[in-house]
Image: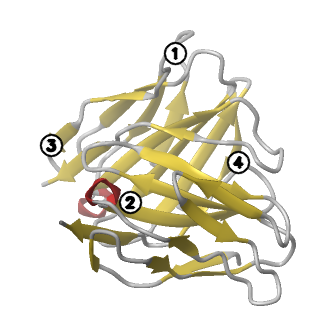
Amino acid sequence: EPEVTQTPSHQVTQMGQEVILRCVPISNHLYFYWYRQILGQKVEFLVSFYNNEISEKSEIFDDQFSVERPDGSNFTLKIRSTKLEDSAMYFCASSEEGTSGGFEQFFGPGTRLTVL
Amino acid sequence: GDSVTQMEGPVTLSEEAFLTINCTYTATGYPSLFWYVQYPGEGLQLLLKATKADDKGSNKGFEATYRKETTSFHLEKGSVQVSDSAVYFCALREAGTALIFGKGTTLSVSS
């Protein structure tokens, strides 16, 4: 069964450093997403991406964040100049469609980011 | 804005017990509603969904009914198994592409 994969599973970085989190969405999917979950809090939407551009983003997704689909298979989230409060589990997801009522987003296992 | 509220966990049950996890939502329109499950070390998996009022979603013995009058989408299962131990997330999607999640409820089932 096709699945979304994410690497690394755990990333430790120093405050102020840049990190890139990587995801391989399901191959025939067209919409890609990033979510995050700070420990003990809700899963929060960050951004959705379609046709090589951002289709929707939350207020969390500020200039510190960027997304890219550098080739036909990978989808990346870059965090510039990480802060302590960026420590969280980051989930990638993908879906065949974006805005139809019952579409399913398929999630990866997550990358745990720890900023020291 | 839109939001989802779930009952706080953890929920601890014995095998074959009845399960209810409460979920209520706030939305301006007519959202689609979802339950996702996360097993240890894995990503979130869609468990069931309902796209309009009075729809009942069901899967693997779990059920939830979209109740617009009470803005609720409670998850139920008649007889839980140890393998159901996981974190359960209620979520909605109204406009756009973003899923809005609750905090998650941890279920622990013992034999």
Q: Residue at x 52, y 24 (%)?
A: A25
Q: Which of the 4 image quarters holds residue A12?
A: top left
Distance between the Cα atoms at labels 2 and 1? 25 Å
Q: Chain of mark 2?
A: A
Q: Residue at x 87, y 73 (%)?
A: B29
Residue matched to label 3:
A12
Q: Secondary structure at mark 4?
A: strand
Amino acid type at image mark 3: Val
Q: Secondary structure at mark 3?
A: strand
Residue matched to label 1:
A70
State whether discs 4 and 3 lie on one chain. yes
Q: Secondary structure at mark 2?
A: strand
Label located before the other in sequence (4 or 3): 3
Q: Residue at x 51, y 44 (%)?
A: A34
Amino acid type at image mark 1: Pro
Q: Position of residue A69 (x, y in %)?
A: 55, 21
Q: Position of residue B100 (x, y in %)?
A: 61, 64
Residue B74 in view in this figure: yes
Amino acid type at image mark 2: Gln
| Residue toward you, A27 or B106 | B106
State whether discs 2 and 3 lie on one chain. yes
Disc sitting over residue A37 in the figure:
2
Q: Residue at x 25, y 69 (%)?
A: B108
Residue A63 in view in this figure: no
Q: Secondary structure at mark 1?
A: loop
Which of pointers 2 and 1 indicates the residue nearer the eye?
2
Residue matched to label 4:
A56
Mark 3 closeness class: few <14, some 14–19, many ≥20 residues within 10 Å: few
